[in-house]
Image: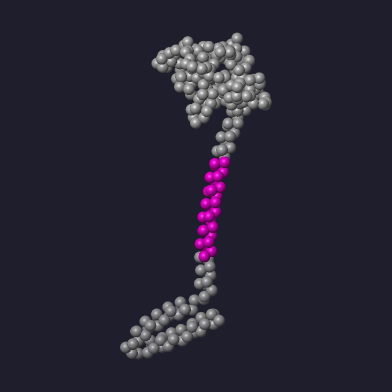
Amino acid sequence: METFAYWLTGLLSRQRTAGLAQRAFQPGPGGAREQDLSTASGTNRAASTAPPSQALRSGRIKRRRRCYHILQRRGMMKRRVLLQRAARFAGIACFAGTWLARAGSASAAGQDAAAPNGPQPPPSMLPKPPPGPVSYPVQHTEEEWWAKLEPARYYVLRERGTEPPYTSRLLTEHRNGVFTCAGCGQHAFSSATKYDSHTGWPSFWQPIDGAIATKEDRSQSMIRTEVHCTRCDSHLGHVFEDGPPPTYLRYCINGLALVFVTA
């Protein structure tokens, strides 16, 4: 029905244009004006006789192109998000792989007996801090300690610091001997009590009698038991209740706080 209406409109327009053309060629003062009207009418006729299917087709093509561009942008955004997630996952995997490789190399190089699983010790087995004030035979001022010790050892021994895990050379030390305090040289641990705890720090299940003392440590928002030398009050590390028998204790000691002396 629409096609018939367009056809009828075009036919009427062509008839009107033909009449105006005849008038334009007739002599008279209105000939030029009628010729202009004929030209304008011809333009309108061309516009009116344009097939409707072409206009509909062009509109559909524009809509399809717009939808295609929208979908393309969405696809690019999805690919970008997927690439970002893949990069994050790859970074986490690399970090975990590096940490596991370090732990595996340290455990493979160590020949100490691993801590067996067993019942946890009662709280009474933890070393108790000595009551009352304690006097230490070796005493120095902070300036003297700074001149005596290396900066890294001073940070651990005197400022109660902690070295990074898996950085101590004593992790792979398996010879027979004694581990002494780096501040005063007192014998602290025997090589017979050293074992691989897979924590990144040299670990022992028992100290030499009278070599260390303990006190409560509430730093870093935790409650721990600190281990220090009984001769110079140098910080050595901490003790935990997850060690092997017979003591079920783990003395986690900084490698910078110890010096190994062969037997």
Residue 137 visible in rendering: yes
Which quarter of the rendering shows the C terminus? top right
Q: Residue furthest front?
A: 132
The residue segment tinted magenta is 63-89
Residue 42, picture quadrant: bottom left
Residue found at x 48% / y 15%: 134
x and y, in percent, of residue 25 in the image: 38, 87
Q: Residue furthest left?
A: 29
Q: How many marks?
A: 0
Tell whether 31 sits left or right of 111. left
Residue 112, picture quadrant: top right
Residue 141 in the image: above or below residue 98: above
Q: 7 or 40: which is nearer to us?
A: 7
Q: 163 or 74: which is nearer to us?
A: 163
Tell whether 199 sits left or right of 221. right
Residue found at x 55% / y 54%: 75
State yes or no: residue 10 in magenta: no
x and y, in percent, of residue 58 in the image: 51, 69
Residue found at x 61% / y 21%: 125
Tell me the colour scheme of the image.
Answer: one colour
The chief SS type of the magenta part is helix
Q: 233 or 146: which is nearer to us?
A: 233
Tell whether 247 sits left or right of 162. right
State yes or no: residue 84 in magenta: yes
Residue 20 in the image: above or below residue 130: below
x and y, in percent, of residue 27 in the image: 35, 90
Residue found at x 51% / y 65%: 62
x and y, in percent, of residue 147 in the image: 42, 15
Q: Residue furthest bottom?
A: 27
Which quarter of the rendering shows the N terminus? bottom right
Residue 259 visible in rendering: no
